[in-house]
Amino acid sequence: MNSPFVTVVGAGLAGVEAAYQLARRGIRVRLVEMKKLKKSPAHSLDGFAELVCSNSLGSDSKENANGILKEELRLLGSLVIRIADEVRVPAGSALAVDRLGFSARLTEVIRREPLIEVVDAEAVAIPDGYVIIATGPLTSDALFESLKALTGEDALYFYDAAAPIVEFDSIDMTKAYFKSRYDKGEATYINCPMTKAEYDAWYDELVKAECVAAKDFELKVFEGCMPFEEMARRGRETLLFGPMKPVGLEIAHEKRPHAVVQLRRDDAAATLYNIVGFQTHLTFPEQRRILRMIPGLENARFARYGVMHRNSFINAPKILDRFYRVKTTPRIMIAGQLSGVEGYVESVASGLAAAVNMARIVRGQDPVTFPEASVIGALARYLADTATSDFQPMNANFGLFPPLETRTQRQQKKIIYAERALNAIRTMIGDGILDQP
């Protein structure tokens, strides 16, 4: 057993995927996770891959860049996406999962994998040897200081927020109704409609509601996780084009509501629903007051209030190459949201891509570049090549793709992007360079 091993620090989505992909390629893994001993402010479970915000992994449609990315990961044998498919709960065209079942199943698979040694400990410094750091946006202070010393960079950061979760039997279904937007997929979302008068009264209370005081001097909010009260302060109509958009949620033969608050199923038993897009840093009493003004939620019981926490990420273009390696110390890779990808599935993809190339490097082979026509490759290029002064975390989106060679109608363009991306991954697999298990 003198063969090289790789230390993976962090058993979130990226770390779990990286550890699994390395093990399936015959590489021994030491997976270091601190949750049994010490938890971040946003975590509560001992298990791996805990989803602390939404339980949705986003659209499963190939007309969406996130949906294409899931298909790429399925082709590449992603463990996380396979388990997500196994424990999915109805959510229209989105891939949503039973939050507890998802973590439990992934923890079970990883802990029984013979080539993975799980070490329940806090990594307070960067380990020696080959390392993939996947500690996520809530990296502990000690390890983050070690990273700053390695890279010479100050931390960049933004604040992330989790939406409240409501108990189903406390929702007044005489006022709310089940429907998916545009009737896509099963009608599994709960919708709470509001008239203009109801919305205006609610809005007036929301914009003066009390928030939790920021803990740092400056508050940076990432656009993709903007608290709903911050959105509201941008203008009275802003929420109507965001999480409260009524379009596609009309009831037959009735006038379209002025605004709609949607709730998405959060567990397999359908006892819990999270309020879609309502990430918040309102105080708990204000959350109760404001959310109970919404028709149907007057008597809502909250299984979890919304919370806000600091999310850290590195200045990837200055620090990483296209293989997720630290340029100055290539034995170290950084994956997951700490690397600057934003989103659950994007984190999984970065963990898989890092593991594929770490396995090759351990064997003395050159790393491979994922094609830019794929979402995986486009994300890696964004991290490595964006101007360092403008860098912000990035979700999968069509704007990352290289342009098409011919002008095409918008809807057809999405189909072509999807075919091109998936064919690029199939070609890599067919060429045998990914050493798939």
Image: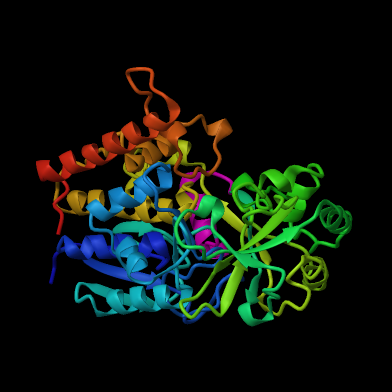
Chief secondary structure of the magenta span?
helix
Q: Is residue 252 above or below residue 282?
A: above
List x then y, in percent, for residue 238.
74, 43
What's the residue at 15%, 45% (across, down)?
Answer: 429
List x then y, in percent, for residue 356.
24, 51
Front residue of this view, candidates 22 and 276: 276
The stretch of residues the image draws in magenta is: 138-155
Q: Could one spot residue 226 in this view of the protein? A: yes
Q: Could one spot residue 218 in this view of the protein? A: no
Image quarter (top left, top right, bottom left or bottom right) of the C terminus: bottom left
- Horizontal side of 168 relative to 83 (left or right) equals right
- Horizontal side of 119 relative to 166 (left or right) equals left
Residue at the top extreme, as displayed: 406
Front residue of this view, candidates 435 and 267: 267
List x then y, in percent, for residue 436.
15, 54
Per the image, is 139 magenta?
yes
Q: Which colour style is shown?
A: rainbow
Front residue of this view, candidates 331 and 173: 173
Which image quadrant is residue 119 in?
bottom left
